[in-house]
Image (cartoon, grey):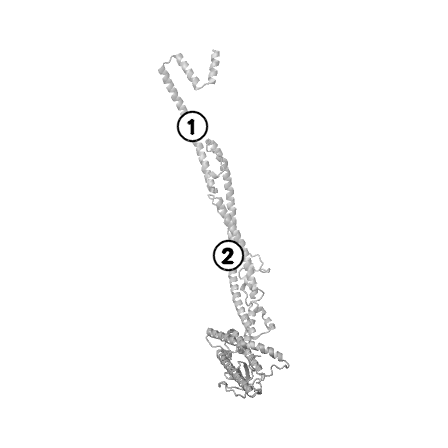
Amino acid sequence: MVARGESNDTLIGQTTCATLMHQLEVIWDEVGESDEDRDKMLLQLEQECLEVYKRKVDQAAKSRAMLLQSLADARAHLVRLVSALGEKSLSDIPIPDKSTGTIKEQLAAVTPTLDRLCKQKEERVNEFMQVQLQIQSIEGEITGERVTSTPQVDKQDLSLDKLQKYQSQLKELQKEKSDKLRKVRALVSMVHDLCVVLGMDFFGTITEVDPSLNSSSGPAIQSKSISNQTVAELSKILATLKKDKLKRLQKLQELATRLMDIWNLMDTSNEERNLFSHVTCHISSDVDEVAGPGVLALDVLDQAEVEVQRLDLLKATKMKEIAQKKQLELEEIYERAHVKVDTIAPFESILAVIEVGSFDPLELLQEMEKLVEKAKEESMSRKEILDKVDKWMLSCDEESWHDDYSQDQNRYNAGRGAHLNLKRAEKARILVNKIPALVDTLAAKTQAWEAEKGMPFTYDGVPLLAMLDDYKLLRQNKEDQKRRLRDQKKVHEQLTTEKEALFGSKPGPARPHTLKKTTGPRATSSTPNGGTGSKRLTTNQNGSRSTTRNGQKDPARPSAPVNYVAIAKDDTASHVSSNNPVSAGTGSP
């Protein structure tokens, strides 16, 4: 029995469903229960066990539901915190990965994060409060309105983006405050500078804007007011001062221009000009370049205006002097260019305008300069032809000298300076041979000039082409006369030879014939008043140029040889007396 009891205690200590079932079968065997009763009892036992399991399962399910609700509440709170703090999703929150663990493990993992976010929310609320307070304070300074209410923080939206927006707004306001302060200082400084240039009262002007801006330290003050109204009023005053400065500068430059024009017109000395150098030094300055105390003060403008009025009274007299000088200059230009132009009429009209008194000096000067410039241009266009005309006339002089030299019977005598005359004669011969080509070139250039200008080219009032044609005609007559003389010489030499053969004696030398010096075309100069002057340009038969005054012969011209014989141009000059032999004095040296 003891052994059995010990065995039972051991079995109870190790009781399981299998041991209990074995004990039940042993008892049923001892009792003698039938199989049917046994089945009933086993079925009843299974039902009772199922009820016990079911109760336990229900209790466990309720406990699980409570844990799930706590977990859901925690997650919901966590979502609200995340939303309020501006986090995008729960995945952005550093939560331990327990999604596959038990409910208690998941709840334990969420709780620390939830506590941390709650603390973070409180800190974020304080940050929002501080930023909004600063924004409210600076806005009050800028608008000039003092605000005492406490700002309200939206605890449902505490995101970093919103906080950064507030912080950005705060930085902008701080920058705006700083800019406003600098702008006020700059405006006050510019108003001070303009008042100095315009000669105005700075402190009186600035006090009208705000008394706090008035300081004995000048423009570099710490402005007590940076409100929008203060900035607007300062800007308005500054704009007004700038307009006044521009108007005064324009007036000053107008007066300076008039002063310079009159000074240049009247050749005013530097000493007198220096008295108003403070006015003329800004004649071309920009408005921003003008600076200095009282530069555009009203008294400076008044002094300049009085001086301009004084100089206007002296302007008419000076203009008459200038007109006379320009007229003389114009006459000299046309005289050098050998152009006959009435230079008196244009200047008479200018003098008439000056006498009236209402004239613009600059316009009159420009008109006179145009007349002079036009004369210079015409002179330049004629220069090339005039140079060739001078060369042609010089060649004609050499031709005349050469003809006179060729008719001199004593040119080969060994006298003083004979060799020099011989050299000159050779040079003159070369120059004379170039005259036809020079005349042709001069005629071609003259024709081209006339075609381009559409007007005849005159030389002291005479058409140059007509002068050239006359010269060609005279030269041709001269060549014809030389040819006749050569023929006469041949006949004379033949008669002389026959006489020598008949009489055996040589007749004495005959007086040589000379070429007739006929007067060619003349270029008669006209006086400025339209009359005929005494200076005449003539071209003789040799093509040379001689100038006479009052009909008298130029004493510088060489006289004809003693044995000079004039031969009429129209007769044939072929009737030569056998008693008058002709020498060969017309050849080259």
Q: Position of residue 343 (x, y in %)?
A: 51, 79
Q: Position of residue 513 (x, y in %)?
A: 54, 85
Amino acid carrying mark 1 in the image = Gln
Residue at numbered disc 2? 228
Q: Which mark is residue 517?
A: none
Residue 50 visible within the image: yes
Residue 204 visible within the image: no
**Does residue 57 appear left or right of residue 208 in this picture?**
left
Q: Is residue 297 above or below residue 458?
A: above
Q: Residue furthest top?
A: 1
Residue 301 or residue 199, whichever sits in front: 301
In whole angstroms, how far apart are the C-alphas of marks 1 and 2? 74 Å
Q: Is residue 451 above or below residue 29?
A: below
Residue neighbourhood size for the residue with mark 1, other residues' Cα within 10 Å, grouped as few (<14), some (14–19), many (≥20): few
Secondary structure beneath disc 2?
helix
Earlier residue among tags 1 and 2: 1
Q: Position of residue 443 (x, y in %)?
A: 49, 76
Q: Position of residue 396 (x, y in %)?
A: 54, 79
Amino acid carrying mark 2 in the image = Asn
Q: Is residue 150 above or below residue 350?
A: above
Q: Quadrant of the C terminus?
A: bottom right
User: To which quarter of the image does residue 433 belong?
Assistant: bottom right
Secondary structure beneath disc 1?
helix
Please name which of the two marks, 1 or 2, marks the residue nearer to the observer.
Answer: 2
Q: Which mark is residue 59?
A: 1
Residue 539 or residue 358, whichever sits in front: 539
